[in-house]
Image (spheres, helix red, strand yellow):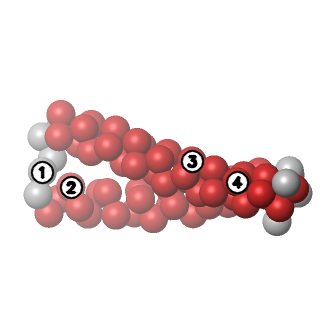
Amino acid sequence: MKLFLKFFYKSLMTAIMFTSLFLFMNAVDAILIKKGIIGKNKLYILAPIQFFLVIFIYMTMMYVIHWFKLM
């Protein structure tokens, strides 16, 4: 049971990481569309945001996993 919970929490953290990344990038995309930024220009803005967001979410989740001692 303990092993099941360990892997359950790891998969839950992974799902939270991908979901939060998806939702945040959709919100940023909607803001850029509202401001009239489309096409290649939007990609130049979204790429660095997504890069740093992936690092931030990953580091946050690793901290949470370490905090719960799930690793």
State the mark number for residue 16: 3
Mark 3: which amino acid? Ile
Measured from the top left, where is residue 54 in percent x and y? 51, 61
Measured from the top left, where is residue 57 in percent x and y? 59, 54
Write down the quadrant of residue 40 in the picture. bottom left
N-term mark: 1 or 3: 3
State the mark number for residue 42: 2
Circle nearer the viewer, 4 or 3: 4
How many angstroms separate mark 2 from mark 4 (CA)? 37 Å
Q: Residue at x 27, y 37 (%)?
A: 31
Mark 2: which amino acid? Lys
Instruction: Give the crowd class for mark 2: few <14, some 14-19, many >=20 residues within 10 Å.
Output: some
N-term mark: 4 or 1: 4
Mark 1: which amino acid? Ile
Residue 47 in the image: above or below residue 20: below
State the mark number for residue 8: 4
Circle nearer the viewer, 2 or 4: 4
Label 1 sits on residue: 38
Measured from the top left, where is residue 71 in percent x and y? 82, 65
How many angstroms separate mark 4 from mark 1 (CA)? 40 Å
Measured from the top left, where is residue 8 in percent x and y? 70, 54
